[in-house]
Amino acid sequence: MADTQTIKDRIDIVQFIGEYITLKKAGSNWKARCPFHNEKSASFMVHPDKQIWHCFGCGKGGDIFTFVEEMEGLDFVEALKMLANRAGVALDDFKPAANVSQKNRLLEANRIAAYFFHHFLLEIPAAGVARDYLEKRGVTTKTIEDWQIGYSPEQWDLLTKYLLKKGFTLSECVASGLTIQRDGANASTGQGFYDRFRGRVMFPISDVHGNVIGFTGRVLRETETSGGKYVNTPQTLLYDKSRVVYGLSRAKTEIKAKDMAVVVEGQMDVIACHAAGMKNVVAASGTALTIEQIKLLKRYTNNVSMAFDADSAGENAGKRGATLAMAEGLQVKVIQIPAGAGKDADECLKKDQAVWFKAVANATSLLEWYFRTILKKINHTTAAGKQAVVNALLPEIVAIPYAVERGEWLRRLGDELDLDQAVLHEEVKKVSARPSSSKDSRSSEKPLATVPRDPIEVLAEELWSLLLKFPVHYAKASAELRPEYFANTKLLSLYEIAEDVYTTSHQLDVTVLRQRIGVEANGESMVDVLEMRPYRNFDDISAVDAGQEIEQILVRIKEEWRKKRGKEIERQMKEAESTGDSKKIAELLQEWQTIK
């Protein structure tokens, strides 16, 4: 019986992708300029042995199937037909039933787990602490039942044993993401297998059809061994965080009816909005909106209003997602919660529902919000100030896919700064955010401009790429690493697992790390991708040079983090001073002295 691996085995990924774009040898990999976004230097890499590709500029990646889907605008079935024909695999012989069967088993495991957590919360005395927490958050029994909120008992393997009694195998429990398998675990005795979620309030995550495909668990008592405040289902056959919009299965009908999607940050924000009667609300679950999530929303509306969290990380993530949504042709507005009315939708609703509903009704267009924010922040009466405003606003204007709207905002920018349109058009040429399709690209869509990335994240990727290639340097680097350097990035889980592996074995065993990280739905492994990452302009680098580079990168990461945290402290200081919070001011001053 043929499967997708048979097709991949029969097609040389380098030769195939080379028919679309010009690839050049780079060590054991091949590189090119990415066909999916505009870039001057090559950051698109292909690994022939692992049969994967990845662009370190725009972040797209996967196997030969995802490449065809992206390049040709095909869905999986269409890509399958195209590649099967090229590989000489008859689709009559292709029976993906095993994969479908596995998906059905994992869906059933998640459904049973959701029932287990929900029943435990409602019926078991040990869940009293969770019921008290939800009551304090204003979550009613009806809301708990509507959203099937649950509680994972603070026991090591109660859910795993329950699933085994229901006929699931240990490998299925692990594949679902509900069970973790320790190194050296014994499947015959069950030793070394334990529940991923323990002592947490559980929020089921559903696909657009309402099937439970994963969970978010919110810890109630943080300890040294409890992990982060929130733990999510890892990448599985069912769950891909970048392709899931929380609450969409419940909100899609109302989104269509109102022709508007309200996007908030977290699950509690969504739940609170629905409980208050605003049912066209969804969440990106704490990350910037991805292209996949945006395309999912576009099935139901072209209008999105987004609420950015008050902290800088939330605002930056919101801006990245909003810019991508605008570039995809959505009409994007920004919801601004008045000062003192709450940092997010949930908080605002608890204080005064009318304030939240008014904020949504009075949402400002994204460009209007950018203009107000930038012009207020920068003194634009000087030549340097005008250039700074142009540098900040022009990429956002150029990202607009509609010429008339783009032209109107260019005129507005010229009027605000008293600049001739000819000058601005010269600046537009430099930005070149949306060039014509590359001659190598056969896609009917123009490449998207990339959203500027956090410099700390870029440096962290460089760091991990070198540490994975030269793990001998990890012992020294580990002493300098801190989890806050990787906050709000996918590298945080890599850091946590790497620290665990290093603590256990006193070395960074990359093979073990790769096994524990696993493979994402698009066929990539984070470890493989980072190992494939080109280091600046070098195709190769020695162990000695790598050690020196690691030290230099660590210094730069620390400095960038200090600057970033310093700006955040300054912002918090102004807020504390405006409210007369002397205790907060003292705490911030102490932290300021520490990071200086």
Image (cartoon, helix red, strand yellow):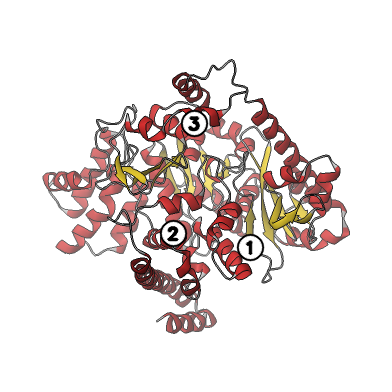
The structure residue drawn at horizontal position 61% and vertical position 48%, both measured from the top left corner, is: 270
Left or right relative to 148: residue 71: left
Instruction: Locate residue 495, reporting x and y percent.
Output: 53, 63
Q: Which one is in front, 439 or 248?
A: 439
Please state which amino acid type lies under the numbered disc 1: Lys
Left or right relative to 270: residue 82: left
Bin the neighbour count of mark 2 within 10 Å (Cα to Cα): few under 14, some 14-19, many 20 and up: some
Q: Nearer the viewer, mark 3 or mark 1?
A: 3
Please report whichever mark, 3 or 2, sits nearer to the chain's N-terminal start: 3
Instruction: Locate residue 2, reporting x and y percent.
Output: 59, 24
Please report whichever mark, 3 or 1, sits nearer to the chain's N-terminal start: 3
Q: Which one is in front, 257 or 320?
A: 320
The structure residue drawn at horizontal position 57% and vertical position 63%, both measured from the top left corner, is: 496
Quarter-wise, where is residue 594 in the image? bottom left
Bin the neighbour count of mark 1 within 10 Å (Cα to Cα): few under 14, some 14-19, many 20 and up: few
The structure residue drawn at horizontal position 47% and vertical position 18%, both measured from the top left corner, is: 85
Instruction: Locate residue 576, reporting x and y percent.
Output: 48, 75
Q: Which one is in front, 19 or 461?
A: 19
User: According to the image, label 3 marks what residue?
Assistant: 8
Question: For the residues marked 2 and 1, what is the alpha-carbon distance in whole angstroms?
Answer: 31 Å
Left or right relative to 237: residue 54: left
SS state under label 2? helix
Please state which amino acid type lies under the numbered disc 3: Lys
Please state which amino acid type lies under the numbered disc 2: Lys
Question: For the residues marked 3 and 1, what is the alpha-carbon distance in whole angstroms?
Answer: 40 Å
Instruction: Locate residue 494, reporting x and y percent.
Output: 53, 59
What mark, if any, has residue 469 been given in the picture? 2
Question: For the residues marked 3 and 2, what is the alpha-carbon distance in whole angstroms?
Answer: 26 Å
What mark, if any, has residue 229 been given in the picture? 1
